Image (tube, rainbow, N blue to C red):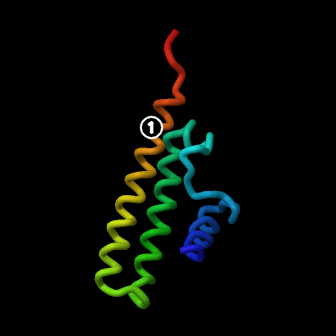
Amino acid sequence: MQEQSQLVLAEAGLPSDRLPLSPFDCRDLASEQQGEAGLKLIADIYERTAARSGSFLTAEELVRFDDFRTAGVGYLRSALAISRTMLAPTPN
């Protein structure tokens, strides 16, 4: 997964030490486009990892990894939405 993370970040022209997505990163919170781009990076990392994991995971483990992948992206999407809501300016 680390290898795929580095490849996806490099292909996106991002530094290797950047988190693909963080609900606490101001760039991801301030811009829905930036947040969606981060979610796409995460999904790409999981997808590439799943494609390569068939050589070392059992069929049952692949199903569990796919469940993890789906839940992980969903969790991050929810965390971004909650963070944006909590940090949004309030009307006076």
Bin the neighbour count of mark 1 within 10 Å (Cα to Cα): few under 14, some 14-19, many 20 and up: some
* 36 to 84, vertically: above or below: below
Residue 11: image quadrant is bottom right
Q: Residue 36 or 78: which is nearer the viewer?
A: 78
Residue for point 52% across, 27% down: 88
Q: Give coordinates of residue 54: x percent, y percent.
A: 39, 86
* 4 to 21, vertically: above or below: below
**Residue 31 left/right relative to 58:** right
Q: Residue 80 or 7: which is nearer the viewer?
A: 80
Q: Give coordinates of residue 57: x percent, y percent.
A: 39, 86
Residue most toward the bottom? Answer: 55
Q: Residue 3 or 37: which is nearer the viewer?
A: 3
Kindly identify which residue carries mark 1.
Answer: 82
**Residue 25 left/right relative to 92:** right
Residue for point 49% across, 13% down: 91
**Residue 89 left/right relative to 52:** right
Residue for point 61% across, 45% down: 25
Query: Which element carries disc 1, helix, strand or loop?
Result: helix
Residue for point 45% across, 83% down: 52
Q: Give coordinates of residue 48: x percent, y percent.
A: 46, 75
Q: Give coordinates of residue 20: x percent, y percent.
A: 57, 58
Circle count: 1
Residue 82: image quadrant is top left
Kind of residue at disc 1: Ile
Q: Residue 77 or 61: which is nearer the viewer?
A: 61
